[in-house]
Image: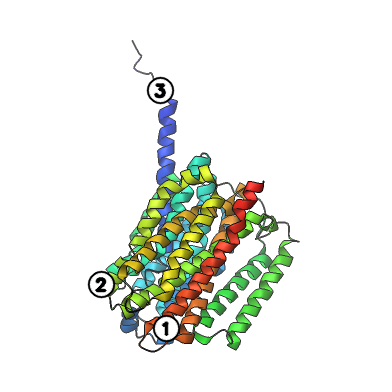
């Protein structure tokens, strides 16, 4: 007979299972935060006309509702990744989410244009510190390669379909409620993440070393200057002195960064990260891929609302085939990567994206809506095939001490690519636009987006052949 003082023995398998469930739940909440950050880049797009009316934005000011977020987010990602390496990724992630959540609330109660633009900029600051830690926590917390691939597939699905989901959600919130809910919706999500993640996700070890102050200044300054110049180019033109000055200053600061990082003992951007041909190809492909996709969003919203005369709600719902395509592919891509390799899937996805964009270059008043729906669906399929393998290639053979820096670099290329794509396509669209007629400028813009997708395909075309040769 057992003694009353005997302590029940919990089987090791049960303990392991409970720990695994807690870890999975924790990573799920981290993914939820990533979705919140990605959605915010586009969720206010459909609401811009209402924001302009309520807060009396001028046409020139209105673009800064989007650009303030993009500028801070893209400019500070490298610094955010390094801070996570040095101070701990969970700590940095939570600090970023806290800042993002607070200024979502502040932006939602804004009463004038400057108030809202400043809040959007601080949202971008919070996102820049949270986002690199999301990817780093995923890559360093996975139990094995299979679990890592599944987590990366979910991360990639969220990242690639978040823009389209933002347009859908923005359309629903704007049509059924108030534009302020496009910001308020972040607050309960942020609070849940802040309260639960500390209990479910372990802190990562701090990496030894000091902050590379000169590297932080040159990297952040260079990225901010380039993003600002590209945003400026969309309105002022590529030959505008401010555009040229911003690009030149950004290039000089990045050259200074490259020279600095070779000499300091604890660099912000480790030069060895750029010695892998597959990583460099993945970074270039991600920039061009995201450039083409955001450019397509920009043009498609105008096509659906201006040429088709759909409401914001219907416009948002028209993007539904894309996230459905991404989600469907995310269920099977981890197994495909393990069987065929990341390189082949990237090539296939990039080719499908080019094929999806080509019909959009000949849009006209008589184009069947089914052509547009098919283009959005195949864009989603291509994104599902591409994003996770690109993430795998970019983070392959990266040690835990470099995970934050590599994640920040990868997401910086994504944000810079988006800014470049929007600037190029907006400039092409404006150059041939006819007032009151979407189609001349729209066809030229879709052609530019197609060229960006061809560049993405060219960046990775040799990877599968190189893998076969090895």
Residue at the spot 41% in from the left edge and 25% down from the top edge: 11
Residue 440's label in the rendered image is: 1
Secondary structure of the residue carrying tag 1 is helix
What residue is rendered at 49% in x and 86% in y? 431
Q: Position of residue 62 (x, y in %)?
A: 41, 82
Q: Which residue is mark 2?
A: 175
Disc count in the image? Answer: 3
Q: Position of residue 399 (x, y in %)?
A: 63, 47
Tag shown at residue 55: none
Q: Residues within 10 Å of mark 1 (few under 14, many from 20)?
A: some
User: How packed is label 3: few (under 14 Cα within 10 Å), some, or many (20 or more)?
Assistant: few
| Disc 2 and disc 1 in contact, CB within 8 angstroms | no
Q: Earlier in the sequence, mark 3 or mark 2?
A: 3
Which of the two marks, 1 or 3, is nearer to us in this view?
A: 1
Q: Which residue is nearer to you in this view: 369 or 258?
A: 369
Q: Does dot 3 land on a helix, a strand or a loop? A: loop
The answer to which of marks 1 and 3 sits earlier in the sequence is 3
Q: Give the answer, above or below, for where 451 lies relative to 194.
A: below
Outermost left residue: 176
The answer to which quarter of the image holds residue 107 is bottom left
For the residues bearing labels 1 and 3, Cβ distance under 8 angstroms:
no
Question: Mark 2 falls on what kind of element?
Answer: helix
Colour setting: rainbow
**297 relative to 88 in the view: left or right:** left
Q: Nearer the viewer, mark 3 or mark 2?
A: 2
Among the 4 quarters of the image, the one containing residue 302: bottom left
The residue furthest right is 263
Q: Nearer the viewer, residue 232 or 101?
A: 232
**Residue 396 in picture, x, y percent from top left:** 60, 49
């Amino acid at each position: 007979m057992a003694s009353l003082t005997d302590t029940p023995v919990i089987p090791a398998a049960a303990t392991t299972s409970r720990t695994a469930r807690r870890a999975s739940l924790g990573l799920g909440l981290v993914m939820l935060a990533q979705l919140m950050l990605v959605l915010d880049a586009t969720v206010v797009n459909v609401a811009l006309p209402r924001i302009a009316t309520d807060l009396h934005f001028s046409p020139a000011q209105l673009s800064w509702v989007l650009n303030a977020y993009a500028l801070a987010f893209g400019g500070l990602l490298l610094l955010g990744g390094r801070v996570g390496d040095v101070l701990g990724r969970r700590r940095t992630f939570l600090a970023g989410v806290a800042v993002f959540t607070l200024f979502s609330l502040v932006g939602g109660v804004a009463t004038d244009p400057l108030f809202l633009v400043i809040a959007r900029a601080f949202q971008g600051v919070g996102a820049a510190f949270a986002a690199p830690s999301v990817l780093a926590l995923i890559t360093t917390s996975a139990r094995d390669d299979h679990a890592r691939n599944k987590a990366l597939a979910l991360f990639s699905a969220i990242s690639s379909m978040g823009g389209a989901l933002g347009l859908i959600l923005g359309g629903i919130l704007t049509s059924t409620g108030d534009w302020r809910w496009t910001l308020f919706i972040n607050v309960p999500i942020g609070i849940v993440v802040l309260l639960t993640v500390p209990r479910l996700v372990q802190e990562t070890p701090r990496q030894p070393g000091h902050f590379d102050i000169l590297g932080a200044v040159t990297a952040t300054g260079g990225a901010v200057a380039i993003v600002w110049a590209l945003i400026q180019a969309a309105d002022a033109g590529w030959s505008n002195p401010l555009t040229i000055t911003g690009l030149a200053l950004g290039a000089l600061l990045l050259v200074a960064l490259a020279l600095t990082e070779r000499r300091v003992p604890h660099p912000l951007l480790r030069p060895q990260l750029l010695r892998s041909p597959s990583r460099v190809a993945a970074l270039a492909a991600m920039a061009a891929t995201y450039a083409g996709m955001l450019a397509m969003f920009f043009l498609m919203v105008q096509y659906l609302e201006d040429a088709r005369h759909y409401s914001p709600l219907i416009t948002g719902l028209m993007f539904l085939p894309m996230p459905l395509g991404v989600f469907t592919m995310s269920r099977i891509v981890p197994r495909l990567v393990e069987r065929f390799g990341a390189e082949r899937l990237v090539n296939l996805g990039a080719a499908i994206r080019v094929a999806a964009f080509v019909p959009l270059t000949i849009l006209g008043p008589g184009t069947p809506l089914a052509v547009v729906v098919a283009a959005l669906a195949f864009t989603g399929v291509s994104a599902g095939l591409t994003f996770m393998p690109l993430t795998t290639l970019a983070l392959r053979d990266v040690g835990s001490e470099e995970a934050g820096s590599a994640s920040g670099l990868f997401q910086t290329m994504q944000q810079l690519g988006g800014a470049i794509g929007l600037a190029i396509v907006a400039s092409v669209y404006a150059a041939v636009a006819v007032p009151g007629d979407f189609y001349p400028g729209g066809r030229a813009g879709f052609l530019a987006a197609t060229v960006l997708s061809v560049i993405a395909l060219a960046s990775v075309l040799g990877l599968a052949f190189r893998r076969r040769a090895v």
